[in-house]
Image (cartoon, helix red, strand yellow):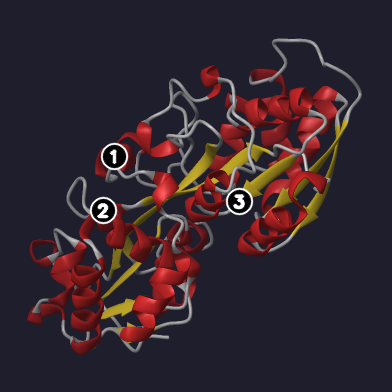
Amino acid sequence: MSLKKTLSTLAVAGSLLAAPVVSAATLTLYSGRGESMVQPIIDQFARETGIQVNVRYGDTAQLAVLLQEEGRRSPADLYWGQDAGAMGAISRAGLLAELPSDIYDGLPGIYKSVTGNWVATSGRARLFIYSPERAQADEHPQSVFDLTDERFRGRVGWAPTNGSFQSFVTAMRVQYGDERTLEWLQAMRDNGAKVFRNNTTQLQGVADGEIDYGIVNNYYLPRFTSRDANFPVAQNFFKDGDIGNLMNVAGVAVVNASRNKEAATQFVRFLTSPAAQQYFALQVNEYPVIGGVIQNTLSEPYEDALRASPEIDLDDLNDLEGTLALLRRAGLI
């Protein structure tokens, strides 16, 4: 489905505006999400509401630091972060306004902050990829911890410098503590895990026969299979609840310093509406935060992803420095 056709359909089928536009406001959005990925849905919001959104794009962490430096003087009305760790950090710093509870009350626990100050806009599930030719189903790992077994020696890829991997390590630290996480990192290293630059190169590594398994985000494989249905890589979740299935999220929040909180809240509502959620599912290959949208047939079913994901306090995924220190101790960065 083309982007133009998708947005046209969504404008009719999933329109946001159950309530009238509050004013012809102009909002300033700090976005850690890439322009090519999210500008189309921002433009649709502007068309539907008449509210102009001026976007400052940048690195999620750098924009979070900027918000902290600006404090009450910040011109930002909204912050859209790429991961839960950044959202948790600025929430704990008191930089975010409380959202109306009806925005997040009905969402699964893996998609909302316990503080009520931000909400997920889409999810990216961690899982494992594998070669259907060289990796038999009966030997697939049940847990990410299984990858340190002798049978996987030299057959697994990972990307220790990648941001999504580091968020996953942070989640492992939250759930299992630093010592067990360090033991896993060292055991993976000692078991010959091959280092790749990012998720994409791991998929190519499996296809090229360099490795038989990798640990990545769910939406990379669909990018390959949408161009080549015979691309020789498959993917699957670990057992339900395993930390290897972490659902990391992009999140949005209204900034405390905003002078346009009502219009900013309207933008947050839009991003969790069926129209926007359908866009994230079909065009970005991420998981929606609500049910009832058209399933992306290139991804594992939404219900499977919810069942597989571990329950974890998203606001606790904010200690990136501690994770980097652990990766240094393991000699991985």
Q: Secondary structure at mark 2?
A: loop
**x%, y% of residue 245?**
29, 53
The amino acid on which the numbered mark 2 sits, given as a three-letter code, is Phe
Q: Secondary structure at mark 3?
A: strand
Residue under circle 1?
Answer: 304
**x%, y% of residue 104?**
49, 25
Location of residue 79 with respect to 13 vertically, above or below = below
Mark 2 Cα-neighbour bin, 10 Å: few <14, some 14–19, many ≥20? many
Q: Is residue 149 left or right of residue 172?
A: left
Identify the residue at image location x=75%, y=27%: 261
The front one of 200 and 329 is: 329
Q: Secondary structure at mark 1?
A: helix
Q: Is residue 171 left or right of residue 32?
A: left
Residue 237, numbered circle: 2
Image quarter of the C terminus: bottom left
Q: CA distance from mark 3 to mark 1?
A: 25 Å
Q: Is residue 320 left or right of residue 260?
A: left
Mark 1 Cα-neighbour bin, 10 Å: few <14, some 14–19, many ≥20? few
Q: Counting residues from the N terminus, which is met first, the one under dot 3 or under dot 1?
A: 3
Image quarter of the N terminus: top right
The answer to whether any part of residue 209 appears in the image is: no
**x%, y% of residue 167?**
42, 62
The front one of 282 and 118 is: 118
Q: Is residue 60 left or right of residue 304?
A: right
Q: Counting residues from the N terminus, which is met first, the one under dot 1 or under dot 2?
A: 2
Residue under circle 3?
Answer: 81
Question: Is label 2 or label 3 in front?
Answer: 3
Q: CA distance from mark 2 to mark 3?
A: 25 Å
**x%, y% of residue 57?**
76, 57
Q: Are marks 1 and 2 in contact (CB under 8 Å)?
A: yes
Quarter of the image holding residue 182?
Answer: bottom left
Identify the residue at image location x=46%, y=56%: 318
